[in-house]
Image: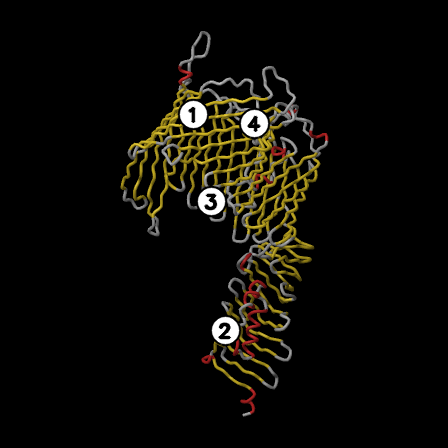
Amino acid sequence: MEESRRKGMRSRAATAVLPSSRRPPLCAVLLWLCLLFFLPPTVVQALEALQGDKPVAIEADNIAYDEEQDVVTASGNVVVRYEGNTLTADTVALDRKTNIATAEGNVVLRGEKDMIEGARAVFNTQNRRGVVYQGKMFLAENHFYLEGTTIEKRGEETYRATDAAMTTCDGDVPDWRIRSSEMDVTVDGYGTLKHGKFYVSDVPILYMPYFLFPAKTTRQSGFLLPRFAYSMKNSGLDLEVPFYWAISENTDATFFQRYMEKRGFKEGVEFRYAASEQSFGTFYADYMKDRKQFDDPAEDIRPNWQDNESRWSLYWNHQTTFPDNSYLRADIRKVSDPWYFRDFTGWNYYLDHYSTDDRKKFERVSFLGDETLALLDSTVRFVRNWDFYNLTVLGQYTDNFAAINNDATLQRYPEIILTGTKQPILGGPTYLEFTTTYDYYYRTEGQKGHFYDLQPIVSLPLTFGDYAQFTPQLLLKGSAWSRDDNTSVAGLSRQGDRTLYSLGTTMSSEVHRIFSVGGKTVDKIRHGIRPEISYVYTPYEFQDDAPDFVARVAEQHTITYGVTNTLMAKLKEPNGKSSYREFLYFKLFQTFDIRESRRDVQDPGPARRPFSVVNLELDVLPHPLVRFSARNQYSVNSGDWTQTNYDLGLSDTRGDSVVLGYRYTMNAIAEINVALRAVITERLEANYLIRQNKFDNKIVEETYGGKYKKQCWSVDFAYSNTPNDRRFTVMFVLFGLGKAGF
């Protein structure tokens, strides 16, 4: 009887689900097991917030309480469930006097994404410290595995493992892992080890006296893996060591320390900030004392920037959207010299982050920073929108890389534009819209000053049935200027104005027909034809007294005509819904110059050429994996194609792709571009890129590369040959750790 009084028994058949207000001591200990031991702190915190009013489900073959020893024991297939988390073990015991809990035999603690398992676990339910023996930890967020003879929880977020190994690879024998006699890991932070070894399968290949690695699901300060490269001509040995600083929840920075054998040291910093979803930006800058000297005699036109050897770049992109339907955009771009982008092609920040996707808030550089860049614009723009008006305030500075210096390059700061959208006049059929502009044009050498412009447009849109539109319009252009320089030019006034007008009209029509296809994929096709003709007349106006920063308005007496064809497909989706895709766009247009057709021709002299080039625009998308585009110009006067641009892209669902491009401008450009990507196997792919100038049959760029990837690592390799450099790179990517290579 006494034994029965001291020990209560419950079978698995009597499993209970108890709310917190009725929890016996066993519920408490098992809850602490589930909440406070080896789950990552983010999970723990979420569960702790709920433990006051959420039930705990307990299952075991036997549950006993020893009042004399004050020990609660559950044995035989123990299972505890709490808020999606499960603890299983052969036995669980709690000594309430010491607050020591012991779980033995096949101990497994599973969270929604994370798991700890071991042969035995001993821990204190009060201070949340303990040890798992023969333990294994898995953090799903970054696919991180940690195992050791012991895994000790030493703090709220810190662990120490002995005879430890870590990897991001699945399997009993991972492709790679790092072993150490002792390893410290901070969840959502970093791990450190001393006297470690890097293993490929079971073969040690690298000794590491000290190593820092990420074991985090959130941003954390620390060194990133270094990058190595070798450039045969440009840089020699190239080593970069980045350091990441998580300053606050909304700000971070990356510092770049880079050594180039042939050039010297280069330091850089990237700073990112996000005050809110509506206000964010990125700042980047780098600097170096470049000791590389150029001995190419063909470069004698370049200024001797080597006198001070200073090379630098600066980039700042900021966006703020205000609640009153206005926004601010700042895009500041500066480099030390016109050859910066040509000389620093390897690990170029601007090329690495180039993107036209506005959704990439922090990792988007909107200009292609390579050797082809001729102009570099810095702008600050403020825009305010109302229902019928739009105000734009712009400041712009331009670096002209084609000029010997930038002193004569015309700058605009500020430019103020007020635009009125098209609105009916007094509620009638006539419409009014306008644009008024103020500019201050500045440069250190040459003419500069103020410019004012007002352009109202009156139009009368007319519709004839469902197929024809006719819109005559009158444009008035009133301009004034005031010079602010000391340049003396005969016949050039310091102040002046002009008034011009322009008459025009546009006629268009559109007809279409829908064809029922009834195919498995294509349901219907809509064919649309839109012919269009426009007329513009602008009389001659004397403008030779205007300064050169005032754009001339050319005399015009032209007719432009063209036709546009479109094919739109209605597609059947697997889910039963419909979608639409324009798979053909074709437009032809040309301009006839009436004034040129009436020009008096005298011998010797050029013949009349009233017809402009014929412009052709073609886009074909017969399938999501096939695209073709053309932008061509044909001269009816010479019978030559003066410009041809073709792009063909082919791909498949596996990832193979071919991109072919051809660029031709008469007497200027003739370039062939080919980019190939072949998925050879599930793990191996090859890449090839070539750009060739057909005028001189020289290779502009040729790159051979490939990638081999597995579940937890990959390697990229490439050989690139350009007129300025030859570069060989191999980059290893250890998933979860970062990149390293040469």
Q: Residue at x 64, y 69 (%)?
A: 129
Q: Mark 1 or 2 closer to N-term?
A: 2
Q: Cα distance, mark 1 to mark 2?
A: 75 Å
Residue that label 4 marks: 451
- Mark 4 surroundings within 10 Å by alpha-carbon count, few (fewer than 14), some (14 through 19), many (20 or more): many
Residue 67 percent location from the top left of the image: 59, 85
Q: Disc 2 and disc 4: Cα gap in Å?
A: 76 Å
Question: Which one is in front in this view, the residue at disc 3 or the one at disc 1?
Answer: 1
In screen coordinates, is 242 left or right of 431? right
Q: Is residue 263 left or right of residue 479?
A: right
| Of callouts 2 and 3, the N-terminal one | 2
Of callouts 3 and 1, the N-terminal one: 1
Which circle, 4 or 3, is nearer the viewer?
Answer: 4
Query: Where residue 633 is drawn, which disc sits there?
Result: 1
Please state the horizontal and vertical placement of residue 512, each as a whole percent of the image.
30, 36
Please identify the quarter of the rendering in which residue 560 is found: top left
Q: Residue at x 43, y 10 (%)?
A: 601
Mark pair 4, 3: CA separation: 61 Å
Q: How far is disc 3 from disc 1 in space, using C-alphas?
A: 39 Å
Q: In the picture, which quadrant includes the N terminus?
A: bottom right
Instruction: Using the image, tell me which numbered label, if any, was put on residue 55.
Output: 2
Q: Type of residue at label 1?
A: Gln
Do the residues under discs 4 and 3 have CB atoms within 8 angstroms?
A: no
The C terminus sits in image quarter: top right
Q: Which residue is mark 3?
A: 680
Mark 3 neighbour class, 10 Å CA radius: few under 14, some 14 to 19, many 20 or more: few
The amino acid on which the numbered mark 2 sits, given as a three-letter code, is Pro
| Mark nearer the N terminus (2 vs 4) | 2
